[in-house]
Image: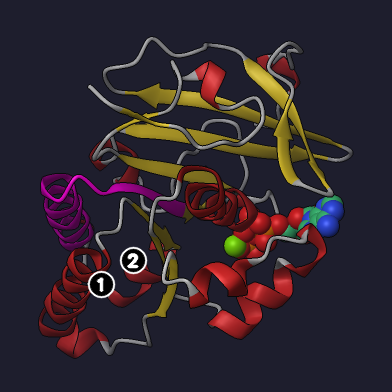
Amino acid sequence: MARVPTGIPGLDELIQGGFLEGATILVSGGAGTGKTILATQYIYNGAAQYGEPGIYITMEEGATNLWWNMKSFKWNLTKYEQDNLIKIYKVGMIEPAEFAKKFSEEIDRIKSMVEKMDAKRLVIDSTTAFGMWMGSESQIRYSLFKLAEELKEMKCTTIMTAETLGGRDQFSRFGVEEFIADGVIVLYFMPPQRALFVRKMRGTKHDQKVHPYVIGPKGIEINAKEEVLWESLKR
Ligand SMILES: Nc1ncnc2c1ncn2[C@@H]1O[C@H](COP(=O)(O)OP(=O)(O)OP(=O)(O)O)[C@@H](O)[C@H]1O
Ligand SMILES: [Mg+2]
């Protein structure tokens, strides 16, 4: 099966070269751990290194805000947007009462954007907002499952982010996202240390250790050779 490299230094070597094509990967972590940076880097590298079109779906920040947030990395996002290799789409607030209808409309819109652009990469940042709009755990589970299935059919490889409270054993906000995802990457921040762990990656003989990473001038860089002890992570 084809692999989709993230191009993020130190990450692909932990997961046999990249994500399986069509997989949905959950990137979870506490506030400020670097989920948005990692997800943007995945889309940016797709366009800049691999010539693959990508769509960034944001629930929280609009394009202006996202580009502003990423300014210090000198990624020329605007150029790739103009070349139609990167698209950013903001999903607005949805009233809980009309959730079912609006959500399926949004899924259809995302699908047609993917088709039109022939997008190979997709980001949904973050799924936490979805959960806020939905009534129940089963609704969250069903909606995310349905979306992941559709994207898999289109061979679009997706990163979904999820905000956690930052504890060692928490992998998503609602406790269902990690079961739907084909892979889970967890980010930790224990000042001054940042660490990353591949919690699961279906179909992949993945690395089993916790690794330190830095957010440097080129974004996230993982040190695949160094190890952080599991016991040292905050519970
Ligand atoms: N240029 C930079 N150099 C070093 N660190 C940076 C730089 N820009 C941002 N950071 C770090 O990255 C953090 C923000 O990363 P990011 O927005 O990806 O986090 P997040 O996990 O998406 O957070 P949130 O929960 O708010 O969505 C900042 O709080 C800061 O610590
Ligand atoms: Mg974020």
Residue 204, percent from left and from top: 34, 16
Q: Which residues make up the magenta segment?
A: 138-161
Image mark for residue 134? 1
CA gap between label 1 and label 2 equals 5 Å
Whether ligand 1 has any atom under 8 Å from the Cβ at mark 1 is answered as: no
Q: Residue 99 is drawn in which quadrant?
A: bottom left
Q: Amino acid at mark 2?
A: Gly
The total of numbered circles placed on residues is 2
Q: Residues within 10 Å of mark 2 (few under 14, many from 20)?
A: some
115 to the left or right of 41: left
Residue at 29 percent across and 39 percent down: it is 181
- Regarding residue 158, the answer to whether it shows in the image is yes
Q: Residues within 10 Å of mark 1 (few under 14, many from 20)?
A: many
93 to the left or right of 70: left
Residue at 46 percent across and 32 percent down: it is 5
Q: Amino acid at mark 1?
A: Met
Question: Where ligand 1 lies, by image quadrant?
Answer: bottom right
| Residue 96 painted magenta | no
Residue 18, percent from left and from top: 43, 27
Residue at 31 percent across and 50 percent down: it is 120
**Are discs 1 and 2 less than 8 Å apart at CB?**
yes
Name the chief secondary structure element in magenta.
helix
| Residue 148 painted magenta | yes
Residue indicated by mark 2 = 131
21 to the left or right of 159: left
- Residue 232's place in the image compared with 217, above or below, is above
Q: Residue 57 is drawn in which quadrant?
A: bottom left
- Residue 118's place in the image compared with 196, above or below, is below
Q: Nearer the viewer, residue 57 or 196?
A: 57
Q: Can you say which quadrant of the picture contains the C terminus?
A: top right
Q: Nearer the viewer, residue 180 or 68?
A: 68
Residue 230, percent from left and from top: 66, 16
